[in-house]
Amino acid sequence: MTSDIKEKSEEQLEKRILLLSFLTGVGFVIVELIYSIYSHSQSTLMDALYDASELIFIISTLFLTPLFHMPVSEKHPYGFFQLESFIILIKNIMLISVTLSVLTSVAETMFSGGNQVDKGQVSLFQFCLGAVSFLILMIMKLMSRKVYSPTVNAEILGWKLDVAYSLGMSIAFFIAKELKYTPLAFISPYFDQIVAIAIMIFMIPESIKMLIETFRELFLFSPEQETVDKIKEVSGSILQDYAFNPVFYDIARTGRKLWVSIYFQVPEKLIRVHEIHEASRELNARLAQEFPNISCELVLDDSWN
């Protein structure tokens, strides 16, 4: 009963964090779109389109969050955790598509002679966005202390990037304002496009990295080597106490959940069932300290030589 109450509490907290991110994100997109139209700034438009694609991800996650907290069943032995991986996959495909689409528009503007923007105004606008983003980021980090969720972690990362983008653009445009007094004044009409391209170069590798990770999760490949090594390190010492010899680790991640099956042998044919149960309980307790959402089982296997 206590675990059910805790699970429900975490679900509600997760939804509140995502709702905060969604509502503030809507405000950001509206302000950025209006300003990008007013100022003709393509770098601001790029930021607005990135934030808009984030909103689609958040709203879908808000509706599906209850499924991520449902217990496993015979019909759904892995729960609904793979839905989370699928949503993140769609999100990153959208981000890459939007980025490449805007890149075409930016390139056309550059080849047609660029466009002038009020760099001092853009610098101030981006500084204000960065300051507000930092405030929201701090609130979300405080709220997320009592919940483990890859979705929430992805949102916090998104707000960190927003802070970096906005403050970085603010500094860049402030510097660019002074270019007219230097021999580099000729790049002034292209500076907005240069910043937009720099944002894309910064964004695409991260999206591709997350895309590859979610593909691995959906096809049940083993997670990153660091995670595998840590699981082997923690479980190895416990299994040694029971004289269990691990011969194969089956490790997969689906969304926020890690699934571990450890196939083992014993030096003697006779083994007590309660020893397996005790070792399994100890393993899950120790591994849960390192990975908040993990399920570990021990499998006796005589087929390995």
Image (spheres, rainbow, N blue to C red):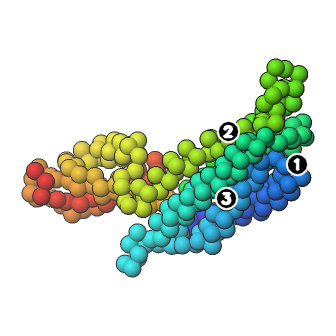
The dot on residue 198 is 2
- Name the residue at 76% across, 44% down: 112
**36 versus 5 height, above or below:** above
Q: Earlier in the sequence, mark 3 or mark 2?
A: 3
- The Cα–Cα distance between marks 3 and 2, rounded to whole angstroms, is 19 Å
Using the rendered image of the protein, determine whether residue 248 is visible from the camera's viewpoint: yes
Using the rendered image of the protein, determine whether residue 151 is visible from the camera's viewpoint: no
- Name the residue at 23% across, 60% down: 299
Name the kind of residue labelled 1 in the image: Ser
Q: Which residue is mark 1?
A: 39
Q: Is residue 268 left or right of residue 230?
A: left
- Name the residue at 50% across, 59% down: 256
**165 versus 45 height, above or below:** above
Residue 270 in picture, x, y percent from top left: 10, 59
Q: Nearer the viewer, mark 1 or mark 3?
A: 1
Mark 1: which secondary structure?
helix
Name the kind of residue labelled 2 in the image: Ala
Q: Which residue is mark 3?
A: 54
Task: Single out the residue that lies furthest toward the bottom.
Answer: 75
Q: Is residue 162 left or right of residue 88?
A: right
**183 versus 250 height, above or below:** above
Residue 102 in picture, x, y percent from top left: 68, 52
Seen from the viewer's position, the closer of residues 97 and 108 is: 108
